[in-house]
Image (spheres, helix red, strand yellow):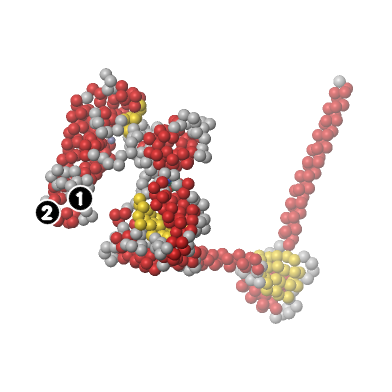
Amino acid sequence: MANQNSKDKKKNKKLVLYLIAVLILIAAIVGLIIFQGQKEKEKEVTYDQLYQDIIDKKVEKIEMTIGSSTVTIKYKDSDDEKTTNVNSLQPFAEFVNSQLENNPELKVDYKTPNKFMTFLENLFSFLPTILLVVLIIMIFKMQGIGEKSKVYGENEENNTGVKFKDVAGLDEEKNELVEIVEFLKNPKKFQNMGAKIPKGILLYGKPGTGKTLIAKAIAGEANVPFISMSGSEFIEMFAGLGASRVRKLFEKAKKIAPCIVFIDEIDAIGSRRTSNSGAESENNQTLNQLLVEMDGFESNETIIVLAATNRPEMLDKALLRPGRFDRQVTIPAPDLVGREEILKLYVKNKKLASDVDLKEIAGDTAGFTGAELSNLLNEAAILATRNQHKVIEKSDIEAAIKKITVGLEKHNRVVSEKDKKLTAYHEAGHAVVSKFLETQDNVKEVSIIPRGLAGGYTMYKTNEDKYYISKTELEEKLVALLGGRAAEKIALNDISTGASNDIEVATGIARDMITVYGMSSSLGPISLKVDEPYELQIFGENITDEVGVQVKQLVDEAYIKAQKLLLDHIEILHNVAQCLLEKETISEQEFNEFFEK
Ligand code: ADP
Ligand code: ZN
């Protein structure tokens, strides 16, 4: 017990000591604060007091800072300097002046403000001007004015580092272009033979087919600089700049030759010169400058101009004359083998599950460009990560294909029962009709899960690359497209806006059948595709009417055929639609089972 007691006492003592220490500390702090405050106060003199003190000649010296209302005062009887806030310096200074007459001992000092403060103040007052100047400089830079060597929008690479092996597929095209590499590497050899080195090569092809890539590969293989610019950048903003940019681009090319100049989207400047008004004539100036430049450099300067477009029909014919873009190379979307090769190239740095078959993926991606295939594998890798897979699995790739082809699956979009039913019949209509059309692709999946803008989708299996499409095939395509609308009409006795895209596509196909492919028996194999309707006049007054009649007939017949097919198999239509309402998505196998009964 005693032991316990003494321990407690010790503890208490300690606690008291602590308390005292803390109290002393607090007191010290409070004291310090009060003392400081006192000191500050001591240093300050009121305005009225100061007036009186000056009049009483107690003040030895006054210091005023221009632009500040705080005055520093030294009293005769003290070493400390004190301060006073005079509301406004001017009247105070006048007052001090008036006192100098009868108090010549009073020292008055005018100080210019602190340099750094002055600088800051000036900076602030000049800020708007500075900003304006910076803005103007930026605009000029963007316009390429006031700059010596760099043209806005231009891109220069000393060595692209791209080689032909980085361009998959496109073997024939590469073979055609290998020669250019030789020219660039060894121009003398060709010149000694008396051979003219080509100046311009036009690459035709859809976006993403690898035109830029192949142009870079030529530069990379030849180890020459690559200057590039996009046609749309030539014609932006201020008039007259396009032409000057073209000139500058070539000035630079001549300096660093041998080199490659790459002009992307050349159709933006090189489209047919027509009228001479406004933007058009601006365009013409740019194009004319380009033609001048192309004609101007000698072939011994070894500048090779590569240009890319996906609208060759838009180009001004003058661009294609000898000595300009007299060589044309078409860069097609990759075929089955090409797609597999591109996929092989892009899986190199990715981990794939063993069940992934690139040949199969190539088969499922007819129409994909190189850019889309590379994007596809990237999407698959993202999905695999999100799904916490260790490697990219087949399912990830399939999901990525779907995502790219039909847009993102939207589970959380609320769909009313009525909309669901409509979509179910619409999609079932497409699918069922297709099953009875010999030339049409097999159905791979039908779904009423919304994706992108579509309420549902029917996916087809496209394993074959087609170069030619027959008339029957196009006619049946129309039937398949209109199957959705036909099913809505038959099953619900009402039609919806959901078929608008189908109708647009179908009408477009029908029009091309008549005007481009010459598939109409009454009009014959004549190309009726024109820019202006009056151009059709050479075929007689009624030609436009006849085109309309023929197009309408094709679409009408297809719509009737779709309805007939569905009426003949109405039970299957109901079954598929019902199944879609229950399961939302039907696989190929499940779909085919409806037809086995
Ligand atoms: P374009 O200039 O025809 O629009 P790009 O050359 O810019 O197309 O292609 C975009 C991207 O697509 C390339 O950077 C490359 O990653 C990929 N790509 C396209 N085609 C191929 C191909 N044949 N081989 C390898 N990659 C390709
Ligand atoms: Zn549809």
Decide if residue 152 is in sight here. no
In the figure, is residue 225 to the left or right of 206? right
Of the 4 image quadrants, the one containing the N terminus is top right
Question: Residue 185: horizontal and vertical position, in percent?
Answer: 48, 58
Q: Which mark is residue 404?
A: none
Please give the residue where the numbered disc 1 appears in the rendered image. 527
Residue closest to the far left: 541
Please report contact status of discs 1 and 2: CB closer than 8 Å, yes or no: no
Q: Quadrant of residue 83?
A: bottom right
Numbered disc in front, either 1 or 2: 1
Observer-nearest of 406 and 52 = 406
Disc 1 beta carbon < 8 A from ligand 1?
Answer: no
Tell me the kind of residue under disc 1. Ser
Q: Residues within 10 Å of mark 2 (few under 14, many from 20)?
A: few
Q: Residue at x 77, y 50 (%)?
A: 31
Name the quadrant of the C terminus. top left
Residue 265 in picture, x, y percent from top left: 37, 55
N-term-proximal mark, 1 vs 2:
1
Q: Residues within 10 Å of mark 1 (few under 14, many from 20)?
A: some
- Helix, strand or loop for disc 1: loop
Vertical arrangement, residue 292 with respect to residue 162, above or below:
below
**Image vertical order of residue 290 relative to residue 563, above or below:** below
Q: Is residue 4 visible?
A: yes
Q: Is residue 266 above or below residue 288?
A: above
Give amino acid for label 2.
Gly
* Vertical side of 209 occupied by 52: above or below: below
Residue identifier under label 2: 540
**Residue 16 x/y as whole percent:** 82, 35
Q: Position of residue 244 (x, y in %)?
A: 41, 67
